């Protein structure tokens, strides 16, 4: 091959490799579920797959028997695609992932999204050893108990989204130890149970248990400050009353040395006056 042709071939080959590398260097898509990954039986969930604005094809897949199967495809230039599962059940619960196509090449797959269906077993019962009000720094023992089904997996969840799973080897109760507690531990807690052989099929949530974490020391200081403010207010009211009375006393004139005429009805009347209503005349001298 002539040197000129060899050089031209190298340029074309290197350019092709560069283009192919750029086409395959796509951002990894992200996948999420709304309203969340725990979906009650027969309710719907929306799965979003985020790619790039130049993406023109999105693909949603589910893992079945160790192999991912295509669930649905969305065509159209868009930054994200939405897939809706209208009725969540044991067949639609599972591990999902997605990817998108850009410039005739597929991106890498997203991380896995695990969707579970809840309400397939009776709800367990959640209770606390120490009661519902605990002090800061204290450990909290919560128990998720199943009356009829011996689950070997339990999950404790609070309304803030934090969750703590537990493996219990086929017992009827899951034990959770939280702590040392701080104020962020306050909130409503629920628990779920399921079998390790069916990791995406869960029980109904337990009734909510509301925990309150309190700082007794701060509480005492608050009450003491309130008492001090009340006493100070009472003293201020008494002083104000004394000053008002003193000011009023200086403003009122004293009439102790003035002659006060005796009222006519205070003089005793004679028998004639009382009988005939006569008024005695003045005596002349």
Image (cartoon, helix red, strand yellow):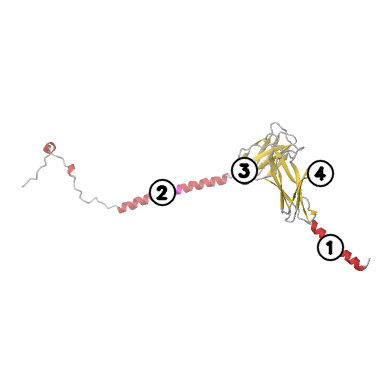
- Seen at 49% across and 47% down, the residue is 226
Residue 233 visible here = yes
Is residue 237 shown in magenta?
A: yes
Mark 3, secondary structure of its residue: strand
Query: Which element carries disc 1, helix, strand or loop?
Result: helix
Are the residues tagged 1 and 3 within 8 Å (C-beta)?
A: no
The disc at residue 282 is none
Alpha carbon of mark 2 to alpha carbon of mark 4: how far? 82 Å
- Mark seen at residue 67: 4
**Which numbered disc flags the more N-terminal residue, 2 or 4?**
4
Q: Are marks 2 and 4 in contact (CB under 8 Å)?
A: no
Residue under numbered circle 3: 187
What's the magenta region? Answer: 231-238
**Residue bearing mark 2:** 237
Q: With 220 as the anchor, is 148 left or right in this view?
A: right
Q: Position of residue 276 (x, y in %)?
A: 11, 37
- Is residue 191 rendered magenta in the image? no
**Residue annotated with mark 1:** 15
Q: Distance between the Cα atoms at labels 1 and 3?
A: 59 Å
Comes first in the chain, label 4 or label 3: 4
Of the two numbered discs 2 and 3 in the rendering, the one whose residue sits closer to the viewer: 3
Q: CA distance from mark 1 to mark 2?
A: 91 Å
Quadrant that contains the N terminus? bottom right
User: What is the secondary structure assignment of the residue under circle 2?
Assistant: helix
Q: Residue furthest top?
A: 148
Binning the other alpha carbons within 10 Å of mark 1 as few (below 14), some (14 to 19) or many (20 upward) gives few
Alpha carbon distance from label 4 to label 3: 40 Å
Q: Position of residue 244 (x, y in %)?
A: 36, 51
Which is closer to the viewer, label 1 or label 4?
1
Crowd band around label 4 with a 10 angstrom C-alpha radius: few (<14), some (14–19), many (20+): few
């Amino acid at each position: 091959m002539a040197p000129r042709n060899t050089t031209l071939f190298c340029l074309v080959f290197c350019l092709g490799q560069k283009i192919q590398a750029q086409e395959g260097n796509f951002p990894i898509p992200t996948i999420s579920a709304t309203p969340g990954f725990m979906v009650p039986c027969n309710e719907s969930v929306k799965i979003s797959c985020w790619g790039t604005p130049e993406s023109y094809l999105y693909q949603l897949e589910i893992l079945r028997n160790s192999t991912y199967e295509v669930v649905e495809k969305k065509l159209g230039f868009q930054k994200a695609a939405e897939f809706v599962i209208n009725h969540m059940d044991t067949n639609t619960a599972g591990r999902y992932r997605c990817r998108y196509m850009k410039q005739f090449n597929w991106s890498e797959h997203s991380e896995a999204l695990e969707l579970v269906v809840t309400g397939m077993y009776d709800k367990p019962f959640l209770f606390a050893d120490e009661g519902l009000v605990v002090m800061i720094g204290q450990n909290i023992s919560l128990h998720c108990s199943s009356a009829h089904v011996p689950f070997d997996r339990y999950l404790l969840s609070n309304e803030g989204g934090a969750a703590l799973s537990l493996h219990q080897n086929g017992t009827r109760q899951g034990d959770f130890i939280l702590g040392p507690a701080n104020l962020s531990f306050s909130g409503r807690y629920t628990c779920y149970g399921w079998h390790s052989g069916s990791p995406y099929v869960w029980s109904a949530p337990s009734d909510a248990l509301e925990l309150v974490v309190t700082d007794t020391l701060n509480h005492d200081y608050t009450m003491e400050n309130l008492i001090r403010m009340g006493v100070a207010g009472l003293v201020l009211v008494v002083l104000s009353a004394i000053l008002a009375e003193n000011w009023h006393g200086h403003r009122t004139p004293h009439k102790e040395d003035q002659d006060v005429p005796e009222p006519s009805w205070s003089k005793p009347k004679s028998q004639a006056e009382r009988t005939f209503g006569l008024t005695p005349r003045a005596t002349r001298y």
